[in-house]
Amino acid sequence: MTRPFTPPAPAPAPSPNVVFAYMPWATTTRPSLALGILGAICHQEAVPVQTFYANLDMSARIGFEAAGRMANERCLYGLSEHLFACDMFGPEVLSSDTYLSALAELALPDTFKDMAYLHHLRDEAVPAFLDALEARIVAACPTVLGLSSTFNQVMGSLAIAARIKRRMPQVRVIAGGACFDDEMGQEYHRALPGVLDHVFMGEAEPAFREFLRRVKAGRPTTDIPGVTWWDGDRLHLLPGGPLADLADSPAPDYDDFFAERDRVRTGTGRIFNIEFLPFEGSRGCWWGQKNHCVFCGINPDLMGFREKPVDRVVSEMVSLSQRYRVVSLTASDYIVSRKHRRELFGRLAELDLDIECFYEVRADLHKDELAAMQRAGIVKVQPGIESFSTELLRLMKKGTSRIRHVQFLRWAKEYGIHLSYNILNGFPGEQAEWYRDMAAFLPQIRHLQPPLHNVHRVEMHRFSPLFRDRVALGVDDYQLRQDYCFNFPEGLVDPLKVGYFFSFSAGTVLDPEGYVAPLKAVLADWIEAHAGKIAPGFQYQIGPGFTRIVDSRGLEDRYVDLAGLHQDIFLLCDEITTIERLEKDLRPLWPAEVAAGKVAACVDEMVASGLLMREDSSVLMLPVARHTRSTADLRAYVLGDGVAQGVAAE
């Protein structure tokens, strides 16, 4: 008797085992916040996960200096990507020798003009690195290989993905990060469907969690919103969206980063210094929601501002510091929350710990907020100062002005807060006289902290208004930045779809040689002056009945004593004010002088002597206090507590 045929039960889906590979050329001084969060999601979903910090291995292989420059110097980004592209497609296919020869003629660091060294990196160091990483990933037997990429990790990620797919075609390769977002990731996937299985767009927490659950259940991983898939013929993508509630994003887990650091140190003797640990208090930009700065490359789809509760931010900061014994933290936030300015900073100060933080801020903070930052250990900020020309700042849609930037620099100097900022040029529609005016003005603030570098030409970044609204802004032509043009065989990808950095031309952009040279000279002098042992100074001290000002900005020191009406006006200009407000404030103390117009005369006199600056109707003192007082304290000193409160109440 023949038994009926019973088909075998389908084999159970293999349990997911995730390996993340964090590729060169990410900096080695901190872990990846993105992979820390995704790793934590794996733990929550009971999925085994390992994160291989391959950037540490590369740094140990070629040396800290070379790897650090590749990671941090934008002029090397194209080269750093090309070295991995050659492993994927072959140097001949990419005309690599021609490319490297052309690069050697550019203004690159001397080390990277040495053709023998470049050939060593391309033909020996990178292949040997990938051989070792490939063997390590294969030995881990992953079912999922995850890759995250910022500006110069794309080709490294694709190179290791291609190798793993050849060895283990059953492994699902997933990718995400800033340079796989939107059109870029879709084009990479369309061109390389045999290398990539899915690309995650934007903020990936919900999509990644759903992906893990489907893999565990043996269900198809197609049709997940915000994640690409290939049907064998064409690419598909259902719209996704940003994470609505940051409560759905776990605190990052950096255990693997420190384990990797110890592994590489044991194997090579290389000791990696950790500059800081990333944490997250908010996403999006509350300013960009209203006015997207012309050059800003934040994806508008992710611009909506969301913030974590202060309790959670404080808890995560303390937990990260305690768990990993690191006292320096950096916020990944595009802009500090207006709520966090006061409540969070106050809470951190109450902890009475020596935790130091870095934040990005707008240069519109009040003086008491800067004081709170300093008490909270926030001693380094990036304030988004890109110019000291109000006209140019308007063109950038910055919503601020020269005098506001000077006020911020003064207060930051008083509170010992270190600033990271740069000066930009090359915007469509800018005027040469704006730069000449800037060059003439800057010696007045030579005592304040200069920008990190001399003037930079603005870059066109994907997602920025300069890219998206280029026609309206007067851009005539744009193309992928030239040093990125030798990463793919001709015709494989559309270079305008995979690019993040672009070069552009516009008839309304002036020839910089005609107007930037004077500004560059002033900036070079300013930067050099603060690199010396004794930086230029311009300080005031309050004495009994007078204020002493010492001006050491120039070759010879200058001493000025102010008393009476001059002193009162000067001290009330700690914060931007107007002649009208000064007259209102001072009328109870100096009624005859106010009626006679002497306030305006004193302001004119102090502007002419360089003690005050004026912009339109606004005035501000230029010296910084030797001993810091709040603006409220200075007003009370001048006006008396009762008068100051009465004026404030009007």
Image (cartoon, rainbow, N blue to C red):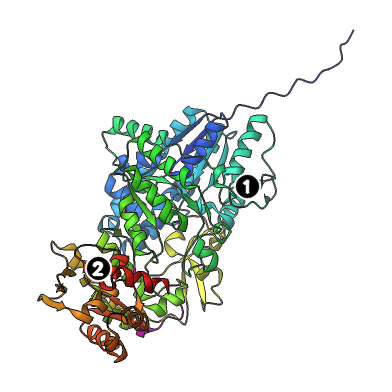
Residue pictured at 41% horizontal, 70% vertical: 458
- Which one is nearer the viewer's eye here, 262 or 246? 246
Residue 148 in sight: yes
Residue pictured at 17% horizontal, 69% vertical: 542
Q: Is residue 82 found inside the magenta-colored segment of the image?
A: no
The tag earlier along the polypeptide, 2 or 1, is 1
Span shown in magenta: 421-434
- Which one is nearer the viewer's eye here, 564 or 58? 564
Kind of residue indicated by mark 2:
Leu
Sort mark 2 into few (<14), some (14-19) or many (20+) by Cα contacts within 10 Å.
Answer: many
Kind of residue indicated by mark 1:
Val
- Quadrant hosting residue 635: bottom left
Identify residue for label 2: 448
Residue pictured at 38% horizontal, 42% vertical: 55
Q: Secondary structure at mark 1?
A: loop
Mark 2 and mark 1 in contact? Answer it, CB < 8 Å. Answer: no
Residue pictured at 41% horizontal, 77% vertical: 392
Q: Residue 18 location in percent, x, y? A: 53, 33
Identify residue for label 1: 227
- Which one is nearer the viewer's eye here, 1 or 315? 315
- Per the model, the C-alpha gap separating discs 2 and 1 is 48 Å
Q: Quadrant of the N terminus?
A: top right
- Principal SS element in the magenta part? loop
Q: Is residue 537 left or right of residue 298?
A: left
- Quadrant hosting residue 573: bottom left
Q: Is residue 230 left or right of residue 136?
A: right
Q: Secondary structure at mark 2?
A: loop
Q: Is residue 498 above or below residue 229?
A: below
Q: Residue 112 location in percent, x, y? A: 30, 56
Marks 2 and 1: which is nearer the front?
A: 2
In the image, which disc is placed on residue 239?
none
Name, please, the residue furthest toward the front. 642
